[in-house]
Image (tube, coloured by chain):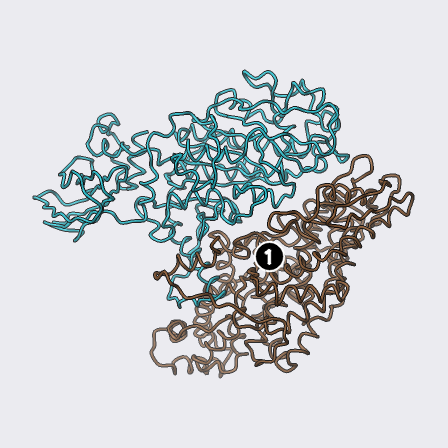
Chain colours: A cyan, B brown
Amino acid sequence: MQRRKFFSTLGQAALMPALINGISFRAFSVSPLLQALASSSNEDHVLVLIQLNGGNDGLNTVIPLDQYSNLSTARANILIPDTLVLPLNGYLATGLHPSMTGMQQQFNNGKISIVQGVSYPTPNFSHFRATDIWLTASDSSQTLDTGWTGRYLNYEYPNYPAGYPNTSMPDPLALQIGNTQSLALQGPSVNMGMTITDPTNFYNLVNGIQDAAPANNYGHELTYIRQVAQQSMAYASVITAAANNVTQQSTAWPVAGTNSLADQLKIVSQLIAGGLKTKIYMVNLSGFDTHSAQTDGGSNTTGRQADLLSKVSEAVSAFLTDCAFLGTGDRVVGMTFSEFGRRIISNGSTGTDHGAGAPMFLFGNKVQSGILGSNPVIPANATVDDNVAMQYDFRSVYATLLNQWLCVPVSDLNQIMLQNFQVLPVIQSNACTTDIHELNAAAGKNLVSCYPNPFTQRTTISFTTQGGHASVQVFTSEGQLVKTLANGEYPTGTYKVDYENEDRASGLYYLRLENESIQQVKNMEVVR
Amino acid sequence: MMNRRELLTFNHNAESDSPPVLQSSTGLTPYTGTWTIAEVKHLLRRTMLGATKADVNYFLGTGLAQAVTELLTPATAPAPPLYTYTTTYNDPNVPFGSTWVNAPVNLLANSYRVKSYRSWWISQLLNENRSIQEKMVLFWHNHFATETASVNDARYCYLHNTVLRQHAVGNFKDLTRAITLDPAMLKYLNGYLNSNNAPDENYGRELQELFTVGKDANGIPYYSENDVQNAAKVLTGFRIDSTNIVSYFDSTRHDSTNKTFSAFYNNTVITGQAGSAGANEVDDLLNMIFNTQQVAVFMCRKIYRYFMYYTIDAQIEADVIQPLANIFRTNNYEIAPVLQALLQSEHFFDLANRGSLIKTPLDFTVALCRDFNVVFPASTLLEDQYTQWYKIHSQTQSMGQMLGDPPNVAGWPAYYQEPLYHELWINASTLPARNSFSDKMCNNGYASTNSLIILDLVTYTTTLDAADDPNLLIQEVIDRNLSEDVSQAIKDYLKAFLLGGQISDSYWTSAWNDYLGMPTDVGFYNIVSTRLQSMYQYIMDLPEYQLS
């Protein structure tokens, strides 16, 4: 864990072989640099969002066995036989769809949390409106044009895209695997994400002279396209490098081309393990709008939903296995969501119409495994209007992930979620230890630097504090403390201090500023 | 809440008091300004796929009114797609070179038929007449979206396409009725399974939400959930005859109870009809829907966003949308009068509205082929011909648009998803795909067994007015292919490609004249061809080239 923090903070590939080859972690962990760096943490947490487009039928996914009699009245033509429902350890009254063996096993291994009855007040039954509500985290009657993760990323990296990429955040803030950018990643002024299909195949874009964009619609669109081109060029090499860092992945993955969700998640896992500091990944699987042929009849264990749930289960399970294989399991939490559940009673097309509440899955080493909430109550004589009741607002799940996993302080949650939502016990309580927001918020700012650089004998270091305690230190590239140049209370402002090299060898040194919870590290090069 | 434009401007400029965005203040008053390449190109790029030099020159001679009249003339129905895929699949019952559209259903053949269908559709786009027809067929394909993957019968998809063609610039209410009973749509949204015993709400919902009235105004829904259920009941009983590829009405599956709708529909009661008369309820339903004011407003906004730009501010709403909606209602939902008013208006030609649309993937690939007169294999090489049309489709698909398969029933997000709208066509995956395609078309082209599709840039350049003068050449290429003029710095940069490191313009002039003097000389040809390739390729890679 501490070794990873060291890497991700410095982000210096040149340093990695020396650390990996032969230098023991324990010996290294006592170095002053590592001790200093270890005071900030959690910056390597990653959130993976899986969108199940179309509205997944929750009642045939997480099956309430204690409601089975009423369920069999309400949806006889798509009912899963109770004997075939996959049992979950410790939860006799609840089981999974028979095609979800992978996720059953992961649940029993403590890697999955299920939240029951997730919805919001006055649910909307339109795919498009409901999807927007889930992506923006709006009220049912409210229209927002920013996404919830876009607002989070804007909060964490407020200057983006100005000043990015930089040494603190050299990687895309969010990556969408696919062809269309999600509204979820829309920030107040720009989309905070980048969309890729193949992490190892980027195309060289034109990088010539540019006319100023005029202040009209044409200029607005021109600016947008240029920004995408610049983003693509800026991040192509780091993404390719991360992908190339991982040459072997778990054998749990299905054959490429047989499960599109697994193919997407495999790339996500590769890039996480390859060292990207990207915070949010988005993937999706379509086809859950099962108005008809949700099941094939007979025992109702095959059909469109069975095929889809089988893919979800296989993909999520392989992802967890691969993260364990690649040693990233503690860094990743994932979540599935769909714009709505489906109606309690089935229709005549062996399908189900648009509904409301449905379960959500959270997965990863750091989730509190188990089932939160109770089985939905199925009425004895369900009518066409009856829906699965809401137990938890989906925005409580978001707020929880922001607070307990992405470590946004409770006092700041309202900036992102726009109103108060309860925090749910779905993430292990020790996942966030310190506040890292200020660290990331400073990423676009240049808080410490030196001039000249490279230098031979002497350089002048400038550092900017936001008040409180600050220290400025120089380390060798091996992590040994060379000198402490400042250490004390520094009111808000910019300070200068000279540094003498004193005959130390040529090469790379690190200049580190610590100011309260903020820290920044820059390279210094001595040339003799 | 601060609008997005202000935020963007704020963030992208160093000064906090950035200049205000140029806004139009024009409406539907007929345009009477200049009629030059710039105006003709603007009209053609919005109503057709690209603006070829021949078409631009033709309409320069007709004037605006005549141009719009001609563009709004529907095209005649094209010949159907053919069976050409002998080497990949042997379609029984269909001889090579004949059409499969009426052949017996064949699940094994279906994916090949779908491929043939897509290729055929690309060829309609590549070879469009001087008409808005193809742009409108694409508009309706996005509006009444269906997916070949779900319909799972290419014959239905083709029939559906002919319905869109038949009504493309006809009557919107007639089109809506035809689509409601269209086998592909009945299959796609499960209308064929919708019965009195178990109504399926899928079509009843989308008919209102996506096809006619829209979902809501500021989060307040127009219609109720009860209206969805009742619309579904009205539409019970329609089935598909898969042998004859037609829909029919089965009265035993129809819900013949009375259906009472909400206040939005003036509490209309659609009286239940038993027996074959039950089929008439669909007209009662459509009459009720089309009697609302909202249908015309919803559709005119959608048409506006398709042809103009996604921002509809209060001025545009008052001076463009509402007047267009009045025209639509007054003309009983005839489409042509609405388009005519828009395309001839001051607002359409307002400088603020030029060059502001991001090209759709089809506008990028097909228009590139059309503007540069790419030659496709003749029908004597039938299999090759379809193969090459399909290559254009595959490239378009890699840019995020798959003809016949919008991502869902709402169509492509670029047409509806706030706040980005058409910006969704461009991302770090699709922008490189566009550049990769134009680069390849400028260089090696796409080969199939007996043919090569490629930009013949030397021949294209000979059609220009003054190709021997590098300055005039570059200016004409920019005028015809970009929306706005570019700075002298960029022109100089482009000229450097032609001069190949030399300083004097005469270097290009003599190279070009050498080539013209002896076009068969490989050396002379290569000198101009490599330089032109680099220059055109650079232009097509410019972000400016993505706009129309």
Which image quarter holds the C terminus of chain B? bottom right
Above or below, A33 against A175 in this view is: above
Name the side, left or right, on which B65 lies relative to B199. Answer: left
Residue nearest the viewer, comparing B167 with A525: B167
Name the quadrant containing residue B321: bottom right
Q: Position of residue A6 (x, y in %)?
A: 28, 35
Tell me the residue at 66%/47% (across/down): B221
- Can the viewer see residue A98 in this picture? no
Above or below, A256 against A344 in this view is: below
Amino acid, disc 1: Lys
Q: Position of residue A67 (x, y in %)?
A: 67, 20
Above or below, A379 against A166 in this view is: above
Direction left: furthest residue: A502
At mark 1, the secondary structure is helix
Q: Position of residue B514 (x, y in %)?
A: 45, 82
- Can the viewer see residue A137 in this picture? yes
Residue nearest the viewer, comparing A291 with B51: A291
Task: Look at mark 1 in the image and give the residue it sits on.
Answer: B391
Residue nearest the viewer, comparing B305 with A27: B305
Name the quadrant containing residue B250: top right
